Image (cartoon, rainbow, N blue to C red):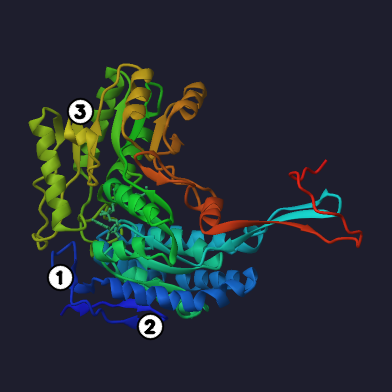
Amino acid sequence: MTTELTHFIGGKHVKGTSGRFADVFNPATGEVQAKVPLASKAEVRAAVENAMAAQPAWAAQNPQKRARVMMKFVQLLHRDMDKLAEALSREHGKTLPDARGDVQRGLEVAEFCIGAPHLLKGEYTDGAGPGIDMYSMRQALGVVAGITPFNFPAMIPMWKFCPALVCGNAFILKPSERDPSVPLMLAELMLEAGAPEGILNVVNGDKESVDAILDDTDIHAVGFVGSTPIAHYVYSRGTAAGKRVQCFGGAKNHMIVMPDADIDQAVDALIGAGYGAAGERCMAISVAVPVGEETADRLISKLAPRVESLKIGPYTAGEDVDFGPLVTREAYTRVKGLVDSGVKQGADLVVDGRNFRLQGYEDGNFIGGCLFDRVTKDMDIYKTEIFGPVLCTVRAKTYEEALGLAMDHEYGNGTAIFTRDGDTARDFANRINIGMVGINVPIPVPLAYHTFGGWKKSVFGDLNQHGPDAIRFYTRTKTVTARWPSGVKEGAEFSIPVMG
Ligand code: NAD
């Protein structure tokens, strides 16, 4: 039986009224397990009005009270961890340990936000001029929004709404229509934690609801995470409507393997970062760049048997499954098509996972791990973000050539270098034009108290996300210059004041 999902507006589950729905699949079986309503402009507007009504009182609470809601929210996430992870795996397809990690990394953002009273402190100059003090304060923007992708349905919504809420904003979340259940559960938990009704709203939908958010002049900021073409679209339309917008897009993350690297460590790193979550991570390593023919030969000979023996299955098959199915049949067809194109364009497909079949799950979106060698810059598999369990190897003759490859690629989300040489690693970290760098670390996603974001086509807009920049993004600064006259009245001053 398919469940009909809802929106969550004004603290209540609200049925969709647009008459439009999208199917939510079980990626392991291909079955439709739920229908998610796709909001109309009027339904988005209803959420905005609820949020506007609730926000002033929430912003007027002292920040410690909002931080206490966040404390309680953290407790509730721990309480419901297994329930959330199961719902997440059921719609996304990732393994249960990976789904718990998805919730945990969001929970850590909520933990960071407990420090809001400190983070929201302004600056103060006592005696900036005779009898004059200056101070700045950070104030909430009002109603703000987040538009999030399918691949981390718990963590990425929490990247957005935790800092926004603790700063005193009300929030409209438009999660991915492919796995909307966990975002709805998070909104229920935030209400249970003590956030007033209307402070966290979830509006499910597609382009129509995104456009309604972007055009609504009562929404003052939008944080987006998703693919680069949509990131660019959201940025252009949102800023044209006068909003503050930050959009984080796609990736093609290179890992450089120097001749002096510990090859077994590099292989472990590539297997986890290339194939974990079926490669559906913005920080997946999708390009291995061994330096020198000998390094490349050693790497490929060790990688190939590991890729062949990856354990692929549904999340219900136990905790030792390495990765699950792709999220939709459409994603499966796209990834398979790209692998076909790599073969046609002359890359060497060392491990071919295209014919992987799992008994009892023939209609699931499973594809086996694929490993390419001798990929070149002109091939589609190199230029495109594949977002599947496919690792491309590009052989470089020198360190400079490897560095140049990563620097010339249009994406700049993450990168890594494996080496035993501190000088090379330091040079790499300094010169690379990419936002997140790992040194002997394959997925360098910083923890909740560090700000991060991609460079180049992986980002549109100002400020990064996560950490202190998230507090800056969801607040605006007001600066006050104050004088309490002593009683001596001065005449009008016609030249620009200087604090001489
Ligand atoms: P997506 O761009 O298809 O969707 C993201 C959001 O945009 C969803 O909420 C979706 O409903 C909405 N959307 C989709 N098409 C739209 C349209 N035409 N108009 C308006 N809105 C639209 O991305 P996805 O497939 O859900 O997620 C995968 C992508 O996200 C990958 O490219 C991945 O690299 C990227 N990603 C980036 C980061 C990061 O921090 N840079 C993190 C996670 C994922």
Query: How busy is the neighbourhood of tag 1: few (under 14 within 10 Å), some, or many (20 plus)?
Result: some
| Mark 1 or mark 3: whose residue is earlier in sequence | 1
Mark-to-mark CA distance, 1 and 2: 25 Å
SS at mark 3 in the image: loop
Number of marks in the image? 3
Q: Answer yes or no: do the residues labelled 1 and 2 have beta carbons within 8 Å? A: no
Q: What residue lies at 31% left-to-right and 34% top-to-bottom?
A: 410
The amino acid type, in three-letter code, at marker 2 is Lys
Q: Position of residue 122 (x, y in %)?
A: 68, 56
| 217 displayed left or right of 141 | left
| 141 displayed left or right of 96 | right
Q: Nearer the viewer, residue 408 or 42?
A: 42
According to the picture, the residue beneath numbered tag 3 turns out to be 375
Q: What residue lies at 31% left-to-right and 22% top-to-bottom?
A: 295
In the rendered view, would you say 326 is above or below 498?
A: below
Residue 212 in which image quadrant: bottom left
Q: Position of residue 364 (x, y in %)?
A: 13, 60
Residue 171 in which image quadrant: bottom left
Specify the quarter for ligand 1.
Answer: bottom left
In the rendered view, would you say 237 is above or below 299?
A: below
Q: Indicate which label's residue lies in the foreground, 1 or 2.
A: 2
| Numbered mark located on residue 12 in the image | 2
Residue 363 visible in the picture: yes
| Mark 3 or mark 2: whose residue is earlier in sequence | 2
The amino acid type, in three-letter code, at marker 3 is Val
The amino acid type, in three-letter code, at marker 1 is Val
Mark-to-mark CA distance, 3 and 2: 52 Å
In the rendered view, would you say 399 is above or below 28?
A: above
